[in-house]
Image (cartoon, rainbow, N blue to C red):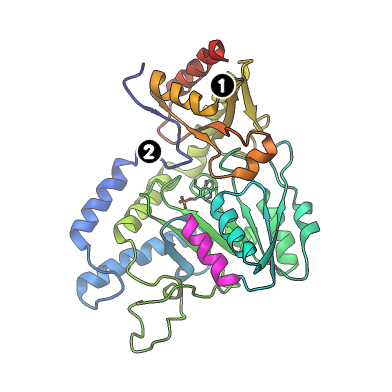
Amino acid sequence: MNDRLIYLDNAATTFPKPREVLDKMLETYIRVGVSPGRGSYDLAMQVEDIVGEARKKLARFFGAPDPNRVVFTANATDALNLAFSGLLQPGDHVITTRLEHNSVLRPLHHFQERGWITCDHVPFDCKGFVDPNEILLCIKPNTRIVVVTHASNVLGTVQPVEEIGRLCAGRGIPLIIDASQSAGKIPIDMTALQVSAVAFTGHKAFYGPTGTGGLVIHPDLDIKASRFGGTGVDSKSLVHTSSYPHRLEPGTINLMGIIGLSAGIDFITQKGLAAIHRQEMTLLRQLRDGLSDLKHVDIYCADDLSNHVAVLSTNVNGVNPADVGDILDGDYHIAVRVGLHCAPLVHHDLGTINGGSVRFSLGIFNTQEDIDQAIKAMASMRSRS
Ligand SMILES: Cc1ncc(COP(=O)(O)O)c(C=O)c1O
């Protein structure tokens, strides 16, 4: 058994976090850890600048025209809830996909169950992709938004967002993407892609801490506030602030988290997104090829890795995914995620709803040696199948 943990659960959260990120968080928080956006003393202004720089960095990263429309949230789930609550009205129709994570499915289900909205879930094909024409077929006069996961957290497939964006823009329907598995891995220019809002999380491929994320909103879209409180702006008024980002950011923001998120973006920018993606996909190809040689292992939607991030779902014939996870952990010190990965409709359609799958997800710190070990460990399961 390896002494060293082989961490292949980076789609859940990247681990470890870069030393640079952790050092920056501690050093900055020690130096300027006061309430941002509230005081007018020098230190409060300094920290407001740090937060403002983080907004600018994210706006640049996502091709967003206005940094003030980068709204910090607790995670991607929080950002998606903020978007849905601020956009949907009784009688609205929503189009989404069967690839979605529960962070999209459940809030929409909540609205649907109460009879407020109707919702269509567009299928994916045998390769793991949604056909934009299927979205087109679902459009109704009351379709308010289209919501699509950019990269599937189960299959790793990157959806044709550019085509979906063109189609939505042509009909004046805002497209919201869940970029939880793509932000930090592949470029996202929301203006070029004609995406109206991007929900992202900070603790995955941005290499920031948990408790960070955000909603980046194009100036063409207005999202109503659904939670209210102190913003440090126009405090005399009992009416909640309407200007961005305060409109959607009541209460004190997660300063230490935002410092870490900002440092994480510096970290990946310095390494280069394309270089990171290339490195991860080389390892994913090695894993896919190694596992393809094993007759007792099934692999889902990974024949062609050209529109993919480094996520691979597998199963061992005749062995429950939970048991595979236990063996990988207990006997080989390899951490993977098993089960449904919060995406039940994907597993319904793959025929894996009972146990889910064994998901390998790679990060910047993985090596060829890690992948060799993972293949060896999966090969050893032949005798158990
Ligand atoms: C596709 C997708 N969407 C949303 C989320 C939720 O992210 P968070 O837990 O940061 O809210 C995840 C996390 O696993 C995800 O993979």
Q: Are marks 2 and 1 in contact (CB under 8 Å)?
A: no
Other-residue count near label 1 (Cα within 10 Å), few / some / many at <14 / 14–19 / ≥20: some
Place of residue 104 in the rendered image (x, y in percent of width and height, measured from the top left): 57, 55
Left or right: 38 with respect to 374?
left
User: In this picture, is 1 found above or below 144?
Assistant: above
Q: Residue furthest bottom?
A: 236
Stretch in magenta: 76-87
Q: Residue furthest right?
A: 137
**For disc 1, does the CB lie below 8 Å from ligand 1?**
no
Which quadrant, please, contains the C terminus?
top right
- For discs 2 and 1, the disc positioned in front in the rendered view: 1
Determine whether the residue tagged by mark 2 lies in a helix, strand or loop: loop
Taking depth in this image into account, of 165 and 232 the one nearest to the observer is: 232
Left or right: 87 with respect to 370?
right
Place of residue 218 in the rendered image (x, y in percent of width and height, measured from the top left): 56, 68
For the point 40% across and 18% down, the residue is 331
Mark with earlier residue (2, 1)? 2
- Alpha carbon separation for disc pair 2 and 1: 27 Å
Q: Residue furthest top?
A: 383
For the point 36% across and 76% down, the residue is 231
**Three-letter code, disc 1:** Val
Query: Which mark is on residue 319?
Result: 1
Q: Main secondary structure of the magenta part?
A: helix
Place of residue 260 in the rendered image (x, y in percent of width and height, measured from the top left): 33, 52
Q: Residue furthest front?
A: 114
Instruction: Name the residue carrying label 2.
Output: 15
**For disc 2, does the CB lie below 8 Å from ligand 1?**
no
